[in-house]
Image: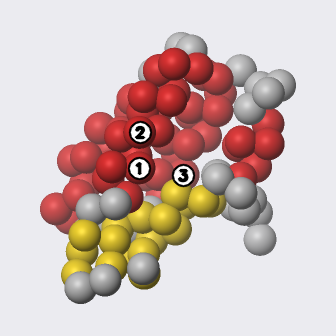
Amino acid sequence: MIWTHKLRLGDVYQEAEQADVRILGKVVGCRLRKLSLPEEFSYRQEKIASQFERCEDVDEFDDVMNDLYDLGDFPVGIGSKLIWVDTFSSSIR
């Protein structure tokens, strides 16, 4: 499977035990907005980013992560999907 975009969140998940979920949500929302997705996905991209930024607890964060995974699994061609949500690698490279 090939993904056309990659969202690295490993460092966010490494900090999840100690950091405030509201801060983590803002980080994920910001990173999601930085992806240059095709125009037809801009509404969903913005909606999910905004939902991350409004997260108040872990359950909300998990629900929005599920929305992000659903967006990421959207097929964009033969054998391709939209976003690989990488929860192991750091965004800092």
Taking depth in this image into account, of 64 and 41 the one nearest to the observer is: 64
Residue closest to the eye, 78 or 36: 78
Which residue lies under the disc numbered 2?
Answer: 66
Extreme residue in the bottom direction: 78
> Label 3 amino acid?
Arg
49 sits left or right of 61 in the view: left
Please indicate, yes or no, whether residue 53 appears anywhere in the rendered image: no
Q: Name the residue under label 3.
A: 31
In front of the other: 36 or 62:
62
Up-down relation of residue 33 to residue 15 (above or below): below
What amino acid is labelled 2 in the image?
A: Asn
Q: Quick one: SS at disc 3?
A: helix
Q: Name the residue under label 1.
A: 69
Q: Which colour scheme is used?
A: secondary structure
Q: Where is residue 48 in the image (x, y as percent from the top left)?
A: 36, 39
Residue 60, percent from left and from top:
47, 20
Left or right? Give the position of 21 relative to 53: right
Q: Do the residues labelled 3 and 2 touch (CB within 8 Å)?
A: no
